[in-house]
Image: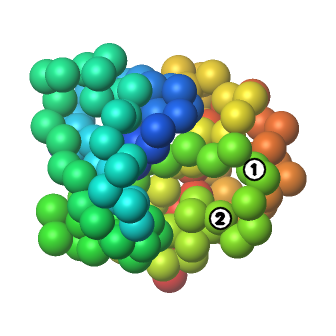
Amino acid sequence: MENGLVLCAVDRTETGTKVLDAAKATGAPVLMAHVANSLLDSTIPAFVADPETERVVAHGPTGPGLLELARKRKASLIVLGTRGKRWPSVARYVTKRAPCPVLVIGPAADPEAEPVTRSSFDRGLLRRAAQPVLIAPSG
């Protein structure tokens, strides 16, 4: 990967630390981002786990907020997690609209494994994949 910024979307779950591990494995600069509708979402495990990495907290709808950050900061990759339960999910929203490839870490994925590449969102694959899924839309 080129040495562009990696936008790492983290939430209040422990999945955020897996997502951070995957983002750091790229070797590129990482920006941890937490976007939430509620300002009560202030305790972020990944923020505690890595106090040295740059971070930003934004207020608003998660999907649009992450995309706005990706565009403003000219991210070359977005890394985010999914629990595979909600439909439509933030991961699906972001992958359909992202200005760059999106690496999705499913609940069973090893964040350090070689990613599987797909051109579109596949909820079933994300739920069971043992490795991250890189979604790089064509066009």
Q: Is residue 12 visible?
A: yes
Disc 2 packing (10 Å; few <14; some 14–19; many ≥20): some
Q: Reply above or below: 6 against 88.
A: above
Q: Is residue 77 visible?
A: no
Numbered circle sitting on residue 89 = 2
Whole-percent x, y for residue 61 in the image: 42, 72
Badge 2 marks a residue whose secondary structure is loop
Q: Nearer the viewer, residue 116 or 61?
A: 61
* CB within 8 Å, label 1 to label 2: yes
The colour scheme used to paint the residues is rainbow
Whole-percent x, y for residue 94 in the image: 50, 68
Whole-percent x, y for residue 70 in the image: 27, 65
Question: Residue, x 40% and y 26% (percent of image)?
Answer: 45
Q: What's the residue type where badge 1 is placed?
A: Gly
**In the image: residue 51, left or right of residue 106:** left
Q: Reply above or below: 26 against 73.
A: above
Q: Which residue is mark 1?
A: 84
Question: Residue, x 75% and y 50% (percent of image)?
Answer: 84
Q: Earlier in the sequence, mark 1 or mark 2?
A: 1
How far apart are labels 1 and 2 at the CA level? 8 Å
Question: Residue, x 65% and y 64% (percent of image)?
Answer: 89
Q: What's the residue type where badge 2 is placed?
A: Ser
Q: Quadrant of the N terminus?
A: top left
Question: Residue, x 53% and y 34% (percent of image)?
Answer: 13
**In the image: residue 37, left or right of residue 75:** right
Q: Nearer the viewer, residue 89 or 131?
A: 89
Q: Reply above or below: 106 against 111.
A: below
Disc 1 packing (10 Å; few <14; some 14–19; many ≥20): some
Q: Farthest top residue?
A: 49
Q: Farthest front residue?
A: 40
**In the image: residue 130, left or right of residue 19:** right
Badge 1 marks a residue whose secondary structure is loop
